[in-house]
Image (cartoon, helix red, strand yellow):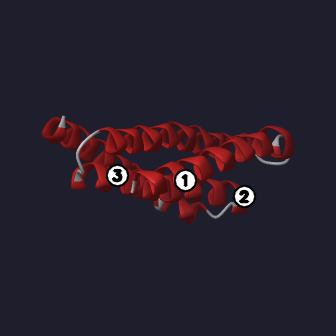
């Protein structure tokens, strides 16, 4: 599982940097400021939670097998897709209804952080 989480983190880090560069160089001046800010928020949160994925994977490599830690890693990845992905689509399409998905990603991350903490408490 740790290998898969590290591979996901690698993909997420790559796409996060690429999308950040795209926003800075390709979207500036082409999107309204509020949509550009939404896109950049997606990039920022994606990269922060990419680091969380790496942390979870390293914990899994270090310690005992933990279902809570595995769940945390999966939820971090799902949260990236839901939260950041919805912000990217919202910014590029202008469809405001996509903003309803973003909080689901945020809640997914909250549950991921809770599972991470509980998993650490129980296994370390």
Kindly indicate the quadrant of the structure image that contains residue 97: bottom right
Q: Position of residue 48 (x, y in %)?
A: 51, 36
Question: What's the residue at 43%, 39% (across, down)?
Answer: 52
Q: CA distance from mark 3 to mark 1?
A: 24 Å
State left or right for residue 100 relative to residue 96: left
Q: Earlier in the sequence, mark 3 or mark 2?
A: 2
Q: Are marks 1 and 2 in contact (CB under 8 Å)?
A: no
Q: Earlier in the sequence, mark 1 or mark 2?
A: 1
Foreground label between 3 and 2: 3
Q: Which mark is residue 7?
A: 1
Q: Is residue 102 visible?
A: no
Q: Which residue is mark 2?
A: 92
Of residues 88 and 95, the one drawn nearer to the viewer in this rendering: 88
Q: Earlier in the sequence, mark 3 or mark 1?
A: 1
Q: Which residue is mark 3?
A: 107
Element at label 3: helix
Q: Residues within 10 Å of mark 1 (few under 14, many from 20)?
A: some
Q: Position of residue 13 (x, y in %)?
A: 61, 44
Question: What's the residue at 26%, 40% (across, down)?
Answer: 63
Q: Position of residue 3 (x, y in %)?
A: 47, 53
Element at label 2: helix
Quadrant housing the N terminus: bottom left
Q: CA distance from mark 3 to mark 2?
A: 23 Å
Q: Residues within 10 Å of mark 3 (few under 14, many from 20)?
A: some
Element at label 1: helix
């Amino acid at each position: 599982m740790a290998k898969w989480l590290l591979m996901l983190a690698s993909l997420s880090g790559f796409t996060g940097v690429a999308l950040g560069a795209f926003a800075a160089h390709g979207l500036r001046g082409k999107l309204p400021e509020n949509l550009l800010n939404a896109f950049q928020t997606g990039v920022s949160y994606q990269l922060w939670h990419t680091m969380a994925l790496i942390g979870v994977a390293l914990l899994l490599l270090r310690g005992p097998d933990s279902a809570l830690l595995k769940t945390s890693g999966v939820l971090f990845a799902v949260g990236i897709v839901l939260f950041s992905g919805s912000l990217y689509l919202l910014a590029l399409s202008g469809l405001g209804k996509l903003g309803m998905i973003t909080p689901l990603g945020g809640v997914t991350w909250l549950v991921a952080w809770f599972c991470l903490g509980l998993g650490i408490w129980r296994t370390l």
